[in-house]
């Protein structure tokens, strides 16, 4: 799935989603990667207590997608912090 957004918009949305969900920004790259895959291909939870759980990463990816669709990151450069 190719997203109609530029790299800076995707990075900014993934980072914002991580912040909103209290997920360490080190996981923003995983969230970005998930955005390029159809949700049907995301892995299921293995119930082994992984941190972060794929359910959390999936929630962050869904949130990042909604941020992108709302246009909130249009032309916004990535800001770590």
Image (spheres, grey):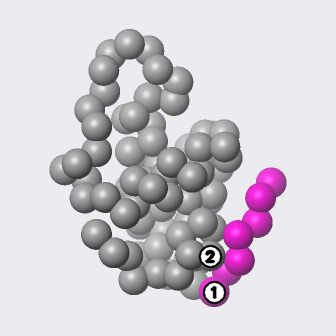
- How many residues crowd mark 2 within 10 Å: few (<14), some (14–19), many (20+)? some
Name the side, left or right, on which 47 lies relative to 10: left
Quickly name the residue at label 2: 8
Image coordinates for residue 13, horizontal then vertical, percent: 56, 66
| Chief SS of the magenta region | loop
Residue 5: mark: none
Camera sees residue 63: no
Position of 9 relative to 22 (above/below): below
Residue 75: mark: 1
- How many residues crowd mark 1 within 10 Å: few (<14), some (14–19), many (20+)? few
Q: From mark 2 to mark 1, how far is it between C-alphas?
A: 8 Å
Name the side, left or right, on which 66 lies relative to 28: left
Position of 40 relative to 78 (above/below): above
Which tag, 2 or 1, sits closer to the chain's start?
2
Q: Nearer the viewer, mark 2 or mark 1?
A: 2
* Residue contact at pointers 2 and 1, CB within 8 angstroms: yes
Position of 77 relative to 56 (above/below): below
Q: Quadrant of the C terminus?
A: bottom right
Q: Which residues are magenta?
A: 75-81
Camera sees residue 31: yes
Instruction: Assess whether residue 78 is covered by the magenta stretch.
Output: yes
Q: Quadrant of the N terminus?
A: bottom left
Kind of element beneath mark 1: loop
Position of 69 relative to 51 (above/below): below
Image coordinates for residue 75, horizontal then vertical, percent: 63, 86
Looking at this view, name the residue that lies furthest to the bottom: 75
């Amino acid at each position: 799935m190719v997203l109609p957004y530029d790299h800076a918009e995707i990075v900014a949305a993934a980072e914002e989603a991580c912040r909103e969900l209290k997920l360490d920004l080190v996981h923003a790259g995983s969230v970005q990667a998930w955005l390029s895959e159809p949700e049907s291909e995301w892995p299921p939870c293995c119930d082994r207590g992984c941190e972060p759980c794929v359910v959390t990463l999936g929630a962050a990816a869904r949130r990042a997608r909604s941020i992108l669709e709302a246009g909130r990151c249009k032309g916004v450069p990535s800001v770590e912090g």
